[in-house]
Image (cartoon, rainbow, N blue to C red):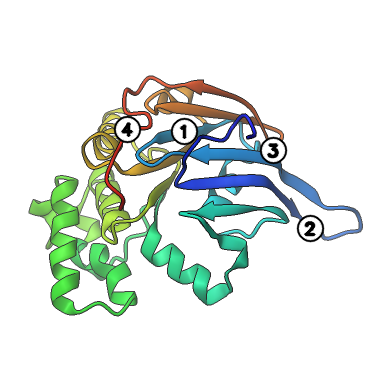
Amino acid sequence: MPPNFLPSSIVRAEGLEKTFATAGVGPGVPAVQAVDLDVARGEFVAITGASGSGKSTLLHMLGGITRPSAGRVLLEDTDLAALDDDGLAAIRRRRIGFVFQRYNLLPELSLEENVALPLVLDGATAATCSEAAREALAAVGMSHRAAHRPDALSGGEQQRGAIARALVTSPAILLADEPTGALDSVNSANVLALLQSLVRDRGQTVILVTHDPGIAAAAGRIVRMRDGRIVEIVPGGSAACATEAAPR
């Protein structure tokens, strides 16, 4: 078993590589090279490194947003590379939650409507969408802001709403790409505490990308990247590493 693999996992990258084509001639630009990585159910993992180290590209391949040039990603034993575009979109909607630096909330919708949107797009009933959205908002402490539109919310509140939207489908993994990048230090700490509580209290698997070592330290395990490769994996400061949880 490769050294970065765990005995059991919820998501696994095997020999993962991504090369982006260039406008001119040449072999292209390698963004991720020969990455093996395993993440256990209920684990909080941070992927960190300098700008251009390949961390966001790796996260996007783990989430099925970007297809690898070589290797494969197994999510709950499903090979994402073997799925067609429709199958991959269904997996992203139902089993993967995404949180980005910019909250990507639709300004014309209330917070509850934004949170319910993944279920609406998946064809769930109105009652199911509303109930699930309310539960997700309660999980992030935003029930009292459900009727407000994004422009009435602070940045920290919008990011909490974005996390609720990512949770509304009860995803297998939650992927967060620089989720504190647009926040001040107080709101950053609040968002990190929320992610830690989701791991600790709900057994939610979280993979976070950050360039900030202080943010990465909140995780249970830190994956450091340089020039598209994993150069080190070390324990983080969180006690919520690889906790046992019921299947989600």
Mark 1 is on which residue type? Ala
Closest to the observer, 180 or 48: 48
91 above or below 196? below
The reply to whether dot 3 and dot 4 touch (C-beta < 8 Å) is no
Residue 229 vs residue 8: left or right? right
User: Label 2: few (<14), some or many (≥20) within 10 Å?
Assistant: few
Which quadrant holds residue 34? Answer: top right
Question: Which disc number belongs to residue 228?
Answer: 3
> Which callout, 2 or 1, points at the residue further toward the start of the chain?
2
The numbered dot on residue 213 is: none
Instruction: Give amino acid for label 4.
Output: Thr
SS label for mark 4: loop
| Amino acid type, label 3 | Gly
Asked if labels 1 and 3 touch by Cβ distance under 8 angstroms, the answer is no
Instruction: Work out whether mark 3 precedes mark 2 in sequence or the reverse, and give the earlier one.
Output: 2
Q: Which residue is mark 2?
A: 21
Gap between marks 3 and 2 measured at Cα: 15 Å
Identified at 20% across, 61% down, the residue is 111
Residue at the disc numbered 4:
243
The residue that appears at 39% across and 66% down in the rendered structure is: 93
Residue 6 horizontal/vertical position (percent): 51, 34
